[in-house]
């Protein structure tokens, strides 16, 4: 019989079919609840899963929460980064350590419904695809963020002619083969658009599912809108005109 941490004491853990990386930067207030909800959903779905939580330079009690979760569930692993390496840097560290054949990432703030991760994973497998991502059709973010996201998306479409919606939507999933081909490198918030750009350049279709982007469990976003916007625009130009 399972416990509140979504596992059975002393059980043997099989190799994961799905590994989810969860980057965490000062997320102690809600991280345990987010991970417990995720593990319960994965267990109910009968998945052999791995959750790799990346403590990305946190200064709060995030490290202690991760240790508690790891001790209770052998399917949960952790990576500690002493100095914050940015949103993308944390995810890349987790992907490098994850063991699943299908890998991906979701935020630590509870905005992603674990059921959407399962639904996306099953669709990727059923359609024999190597890539999958969410499209946020309902979002509870502030109006200014929605306006800026729409503007960035419009510029992205002009530069890359993408058939895909919402390049920043998560969860995102990819096979180990795709991860090797892509050689993802963005250590900031551009990692999500880079995923779409690399899919286009490698002519690898992406499965999309429509999702709701929920309200954060607590606290505020770690992104700084103005600075992130400038960096985002700069990266779009670099990937369009200077990178192969």
Image (spheres, rainbow, N blue to C red):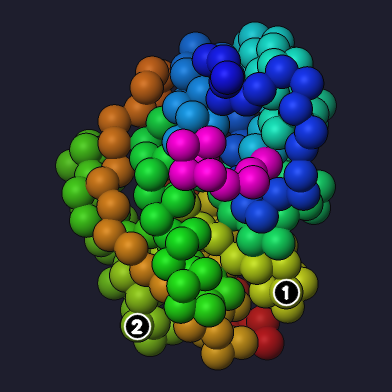
| Quarter of the C terminus within the rendering | bottom right
Residue ID for mark 2: 163
Residue 235 can be seen, yes or no = no
Q: Nearer the viewer, residue 15 or 206?
A: 15
> Quick one: SS at disc 1?
helix
Q: Which of marks 2 and 1 is in front?
A: 1
Q: Could you tell me how many numbered marks the image carries?
A: 2
Tell me where residue 221 sits by quadrant: top left
Circle 1 Cα neighbour tier, 10 Å, few/some/many (<14 / 14–19 / ≥20): few
| Quarter of the N terminus within the rendering | top right
Residue 15 in the image: above or below residue 3: below
Circle 2 Cα neighbour tier, 10 Å, few/some/many (<14 / 14–19 / ≥20): few
Q: Which of 11 and 192 is in front in this view?
A: 11
Using residue 14 as the reference point, say whether residue 186 is left or right of it: left
Residue 3 in the image: above or below residue 114: above
Residue 213 percent coordinates (x, y):
29, 43
Residue drawn at 49 percent across, 12 percent down: 29
Report the residue that reaches farthest toward the front: 1
The Cα atoms of the two marked residues, 2 and 1, are separated by 22 Å
Q: Nearer the viewer, residue 78 or 6?
A: 6
Residue 191 in the image: above or below residue 142: below
Residue 20 in the image: above or below residue 155: above
Residue drawn at 64 percent across, 61 percent down: 102
Which labelled disc corresponds to residue 177?
1
Q: Nearer the viewer, residue 232 or 63?
A: 63
In magenta, the rendered stretch is 42-50
Residue 164 percent coordinates (x, y):
36, 76
Q: Does the magenta stretch include residue 168?
A: no
Tell me where residue 41 sits by quadrant: top left
Residue 192 percent coordinates (x, y):
52, 59
Residue 40 percent coordinates (x, y):
49, 29
Which labelled disc corresponds to residue 17?
none
């Amino acid at each position: 019989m399972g416990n509140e941490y979504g596992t059975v004491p002393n059980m043997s853990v099989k190799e994961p079919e799905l590994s989810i990386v969860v980057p965490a930067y000062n997320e102690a207030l809600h991280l345990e609840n987010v991970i417990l909800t995720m593990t319960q959903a994965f267990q109910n779905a009968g998945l052999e899963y791995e959750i790799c939580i990346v403590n990305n330079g946190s200064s709060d009690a995030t490290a202690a929460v991760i240790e508690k979760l790891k001790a209770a569930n052998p399917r949960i692993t952790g990576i500690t980064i002493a100095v914050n390496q940015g949103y993308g840097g944390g995810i890349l560290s987790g992907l490098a350590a994850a063991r699943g054949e299908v890998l991906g990432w979701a935020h630590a703030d509870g905005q992603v419904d674990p059921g959407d991760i399962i639904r996306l994973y099953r669709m990727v497998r059923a359609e024999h695809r190597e890539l999958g991502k969410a499209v946020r059709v309902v979002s509870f973010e502030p109006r200014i963020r929605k306006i800026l996201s729409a503007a960035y998306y419009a510029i992205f479409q002009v530069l890359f002619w993408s058939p895909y919606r919402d390049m920043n939507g998560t969860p995102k999933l990819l096979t180990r083969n795709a991860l090797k081909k892509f050689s993802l490198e963005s250590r900031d918030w551009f990692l999500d658009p880079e995923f779409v750009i690399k899919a286009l350049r490698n002519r690898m279709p992406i499965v999309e599912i429509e999702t709701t982007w929920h309200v954060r469990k607590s606290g505020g976003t770690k992104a700084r809108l103005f600075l992130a916007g400038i960096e985002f625009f700069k990266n779009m130009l670099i990937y369009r005109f200077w990178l192969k």
